[in-house]
Image (tube, helix red, strand yellow):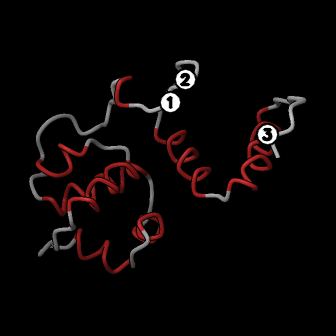
Amino acid sequence: MTTLAGRIRKARLRAGISQQQLAERLKVTRGAVANWEGANGVVPATERLQRIAQETGVSFEWLATGRGACKYEPLLDDIPGVIGMELVSDHLELRLLHALRAVPRRQQGRIIKTVEAHAGIYLADNLE
């Protein structure tokens, strides 16, 4: 896609999220997202473009300019606090990580235990 509006839409669709979900993550209205994706494409601020790229898992350069690879592939130097060299392997893991980070810290332990239970992982440590 050659237009910024088209790239924003493509990024959102690739991430599997609705306009409303992206709006909630960015703390804007659904109408703002629709305007960014519209034919007359309102151009979001640079900081907002960076957040759109983060939330949708695309590279900022591709989103802003159409150049480079669409998919964001971070270098280890770009990742603060890499623990045990574990990296997010796909957009679903990234969505889970973003969602977990959006939850108040005091609730994160319960969410982790729920996901672990669904995966059949039972650890004795106390996360709460």
Query: Which residue is drawn at the image coordinates 45% and 59% (left, top)?
Result: 17
Query: Which residue is drawn at the image coordinates 52% and 42% (left, top)?
Result: 92
Q: Is residue 91 above or below residue 73?
A: below
Q: Earlier in the sequence, mark 2 or mark 1?
A: 1
- Amino acid at circle 3: His
Relative depth, front residue between 77 and 43: 77
The image position of residue 43, as x and y in percent, is 16, 69
Q: Is residue 111 above or below residue 47?
A: above
Does residue 34 appear to the left or right of 105 in the view shown? left
Q: Which mark identifies residue 81?
A: 1
Find numbered disc 3 in the image and state the secondary structure of the residue it sits on: helix
Picture quadrant where residue 76 is located: top left
- Amino acid at circle 1: Gly
Q: CA distance from mark 1 to mark 3?
A: 27 Å
Task: Please name the residue that numbered disc 3 is placed on.
Answer: 118
Does residue 100 appear to the left or right of 29 in the view shown? right
Do residues under tags 2 and 3 come within 8 Å of each other at their CB atoms? no
The image position of residue 58, as x and y in percent, is 31, 44
Find numbered disc 2 in the image and state the secondary structure of the residue it sits on: loop
- Amino acid at circle 2: Glu
Q: Pointer 2: residues within 10 angstroms few (<14), some, or many (20+)?
A: few
Q: Is residue 127 above or below residue 24?
A: above
**Front tag of 2 and 3:** 2
Q: CA distance from mark 2 to mark 3?
A: 20 Å
Picture quadrant where residue 79 is located: top left
